[in-house]
């Protein structure tokens, strides 16, 4: 396995990502857009999720493909970002066709960034406009760190951020991950700079510091704040997966979250993983290939989580330092 040419989820052909931030509010939105509708699945393991249109991603539901996926800050207010994306897609003529109407299918998930020091006293919900703006700038290249849905994210001890990573398998299938890291727990070990995800690092994509020393006697570190967290992610591939197989990919990818964040999947997190499959590459072995894709998704997600925190940048009013300021 090796990273794709960009080491981004957009190494999966046919996918683009758009970010937009409001640095005064300290929040943002990230949109994953397909050049064409794509198969999607989802798996939720956190105890406090905030979602839109996730029920229709079950394998037994009528709609088997979506037009875009949305990750947003703003807690429940941020769910409105997907409405802005849906409006823009409808104007393009995209969506699930019913008679003479096209209904864009835009599942989304949110994280809680309302207590991060930003100005939250808006009169009108800003997220619908932010969602539309993020869609408008969707491209193959996009920023990581304090960008998009990760703009206002925090972990227990450091700024969070938006991360991405990819890998190309030996059979030519590409797998990528995109994540907004706003975890209740820690992404680094103890008081040092080493990332929990260090065993999965490729090159020096998040500093090349190697693994730290884990002390099982150390007290568990977490925000300890109900509703004040959540890590939301998308894993994607160009393999031809059914909706059921995409859901299994999302399930497997949660292993990467648990490898990179300690603790993860807590009652106060809304930890969620979407899966996207563009269908460009047929599976030679439906059993082993899906196993390998799920493993690759977990490794990519662990790496993407570390990259998101590693690349975060400082800003006025921050409540926590970023990794670069503390260790870089």
Image (cartoon, helix red, strand yellow):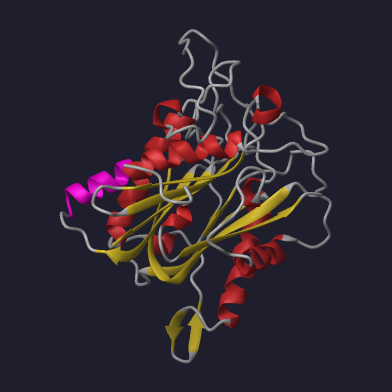
Please give the name of the residue rendered at 65% of the width and 29% of the height, measured from the top-left corner.
323
Quarter of the image with the N terminus in it: top left
- Image quarter for residue 283? bottom left
* Front position in the image: 232 or 8: 8
**Residue 60 is at least partly visible in this image:** no
Q: Is residue 289 magenta?
A: yes
Position in image of residue 5 (x %, y %): 44, 51
Image x and y of residue 315, in percent:
78, 39
Q: For this rendering, which residue is in front, 1 or 306? A: 1
Residue 20 appears in view: yes
Above or below 295: residue 222 = above
Residue 217 image position (x, y, % from top left): 49, 7
Tell me where the magenta segment starts and ends, as one range.
286-295
Image: 327 above or below 137: above
Q: In which quadrant will I find the C terminus?
A: top right
Specify the quadrant of the image occupied by residue 79.
bottom right
Quadrant of residue 319 in the image? top right
Q: Main secondary structure of the magenta part?
A: helix
Q: Seen in the image, is 298 located left or right of residue 18?
A: left
């Amino acid at each position: 396995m090796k990273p794709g040419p960009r080491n981004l989820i957009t190494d999966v052909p046919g996918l683009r990502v758009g970010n937009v931030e409001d640095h005064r509010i300290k929040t943002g939105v990230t949109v994953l857009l397909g050049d064409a509708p794509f198969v999607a699945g989802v798996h939720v393991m956190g105890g406090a999720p905030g979602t839109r249109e996730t029920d229709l991603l079950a394998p037994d539901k009528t709609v088997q493909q979506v037009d875009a996926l949305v990750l947003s800050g703003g807690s429940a207010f941020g769910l409105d970002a997907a409405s802005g994306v849906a409006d823009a897609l409808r104007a393009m003529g995209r969506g699930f066709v019913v008679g003479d109407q096209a209904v864009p299918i835009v599942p989304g998930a949110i994280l809680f960034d309302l207590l991060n020091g930003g100005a939250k006293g808006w009169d009108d919900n800003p997220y619908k406009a932010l969602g539309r703006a993020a869609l408008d700038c969707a491209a193959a290249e996009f920023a990581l760190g304090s960008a998009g849905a990760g703009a206002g994210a925090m972990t227990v001890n450091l700024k969070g951020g938006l991360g991405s990573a990819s890998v190309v398998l030996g059979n030519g299938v590409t797998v990528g991950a995109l994540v907004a890291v706003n975890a209740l727990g820690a992404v680094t070990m103890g008081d040092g700079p080493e990332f929990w995800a260090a065993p999965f690092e490729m090159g020096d994509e998040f500093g090349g510091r190697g693994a730290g020393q884990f002390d099982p006697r150390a007290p568990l570190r977490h925000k300890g704040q109900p509703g004040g967290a959540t890590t939301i992610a998308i894993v994607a591939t160009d393999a031809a997966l059914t909706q059921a197989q995409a859901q299994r990919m999302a399930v497997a990818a949660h292993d990467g979250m648990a490898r990179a964040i300690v603790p993860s999947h807590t009652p106060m997190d809304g930890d969620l993983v979407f899966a996207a499959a563009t269908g460009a590459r047929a599976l030679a072995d439906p059993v082993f290939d899906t196993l390998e894709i799920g493993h690759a998704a977990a490794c990519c997600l662990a790496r993407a989580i570390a990259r998101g925190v590693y690349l975060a940048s400082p800003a006025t009013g921050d409540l926590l330092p970023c990794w670069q300021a503390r260790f870089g």
